[in-house]
Image (tube, rainbow, N blue to C red):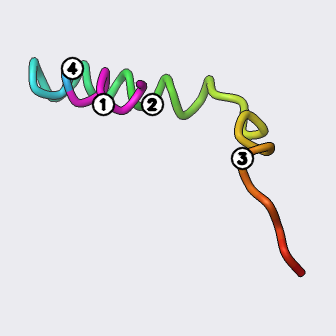
Amino acid sequence: MEFWISVLLTILGYLPGVLYAVYVILSVDPRRHDDDYVYVA
């Protein structure tokens, strides 16, 4: 969902899209998707 919001804001103007992308990168917890991957050793 964040991707599409960023694309829409970038279409509306370069700066709003970049600012939103930076906000998402800084605010999203890096462990948010830890359960999505299975590691095989």
Q: Relative to residue 33, is residue 23 depicted above or below?
A: above
Callout 4–callout 3 Cβ contact below 8 Å: no
Please name which of the two marks, 4 or 1, marks the residue nearer to the observer. 4
Q: From mark 4 to mark 1, how far is it between C-alphas? A: 8 Å
Mark 4: amino acid = Leu
Say whether disc 3 or disc 2 marks the residue closer to the N-terminus.
2
For the C terminus, give its image quadrant.
bottom right
Is 28 positioned to the left or the right of 29 in the image?
left
Q: Residue at x 83, y 68 (%)?
A: 39
Looking at the picture, tell me which residue is in the foreground, 9 or 15.
9
SS assignment at label 4: helix
**Residue at image mark 4:** 9
Mark 3 crowdedness (10 Å alpha carbons): few <14, some 14-19, many ≥20: few
Determine whether 37 is above or below 6 in the image.
below
Q: Earlier in the sequence, mark 2 or mark 4?
A: 4
Q: Quadrant of residue 18?
A: top left
Q: Which residues are magenta?
A: 1-7
| Residue type, numbered disc 2 | Val
Q: Which of disc 3 and disc 4 is earlier in sequence?
A: 4
Q: Please give the name of the residue rendered at 42% of the width and 26% of the height, measured from the top-left corner.
A: 2
Q: Gap between marks 4 and 3, in whole Å?
A: 28 Å
